[in-house]
Amino acid sequence: MGATVLGRPLALLERFDHNAMLSLFASRRYHYWAGTPVMADILGRCPLPAPHPAPPYCIFAGRLTEPVCRAFEARFGVRLRQVYGTTESGPVTADTGAHAEVRSDTAGRALPGAAVRIGEDPLSPFPQGAPGRVWVSSPWGMGGYGFPPELAPGASAGGWWPSPDIGRVDEAGYLTLLGRLDDFVRTGSGHLVNPAQVAGALEGHPGVIEAVVVPVATPAGPVVGVLVEGAAPLPAVPGLRRRLAQSLPPWSRPRVVATTDHLPRLASGRADRRACIAILERALSAGGGTE
């Protein structure tokens, strides 16, 4: 649909290959690219045969980290744009601003006809800037889906559908996604920790490429662990802990921290969470990186 609206050619790749993607960028025939944060990270770090811009509109359904956005813009001269939507409601928000106004750390503002509220009850939403569950109202909501096709969507409240996402909306109407409810870690002490907030606290630390935050089992219950991929030389664990202490309350700081020069990854390029948990469990058993 994007190619049709723009009156431009459409290219489909059987699988993501950074060299093939760079060739498409270099052709300058395309004005729109729908990618993933992992793809943007790879393109921002892989060898570049020659400098050239990316398509002017690079759209992502997923949280973008500051280092990835900064590296991509420095290399290709284009700011990455987030969009947000759900299976039940379709597209909800998008960053449609001019290039200089793009805010890559947000998912943009509500599209015409759609609306977003934050809180436990959409009829009594939280004030601007407060984090909470994302509620969505959209004219594109589906009445049924799945197999069988009459499967009904989840219950709504006054026409508002409860998403599984946590976020906040600022005074300008921009939605910032903070994570998913089912990704949160409930520790043995009863605290609910947002992995995205812990990972975000490490973004921008010298040498940090990516941080994966996962629950690690202990006899006293789950604790928070973080496995950090770093560029050589690898960041020192004490320095990472000091960084975390600057922006996180004590109850949400990871119990175990470990570093690696290569995160274990799935075929899709995403971090392999199970393999990360196994590495952190071994570090916890050995007493390394713990406090």
Image (cartoon, grey):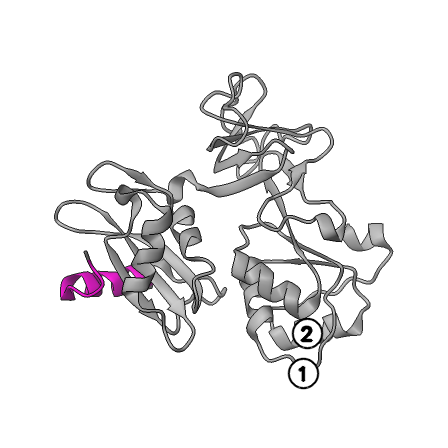
Tell me what residue is drawn at x 31 percent, y 57 percent.
Answer: 242
Q: In the current view of this chain or complex, which residue is farthest to the bottom?
A: 49
Spatial separation of the CA atoms under disc 2 and disc 1 = 9 Å
Which numbered disc, 2 or 1, marks the residue that appears first in the sequence?
Answer: 2
Q: Depth check: 32 or 224 in front?
A: 224
Task: Check if residue 42 falls in the magenta segment.
Answer: no
Residue 121 image offset from top left, x and y in percent: 48, 20
Q: Is residue 62 visible?
A: yes
Label 2, on which residue? 22
Judge the density around disc 1: few (<14), some (14-19), many (≥20) Cα neighbours within 10 Å. few
Magenta extent: 276-290
**Label 2: element kind:** helix
Label 1, on which residue? 49
Tell me what residue is drawn at x 57 percent, y 49 percent.
Answer: 105
Nearest-to-viewer mark from 2 and 1: 1
Tell me what residue is drawn at x 52 percent, y 42 percent.
Answer: 177
In the depicted structure, whether residue 48 falls above or below residue 187: below
Q: Depth check: 281 or 4 in front?
A: 281
Horizontal arrangement in the rendering, residue 173 relative to residue 252 (left or right): right
- Disc number placed over residue 152 in the picture, else none: none
Horizontal arrangement in the rendering, residue 8 relative to residue 109 (left or right): right
Contact between labelled residues 1 and 2, with CB atoms less than 8 Å apart: yes
In the depicted structure, whether residue 134 falls above or below residue 250: above
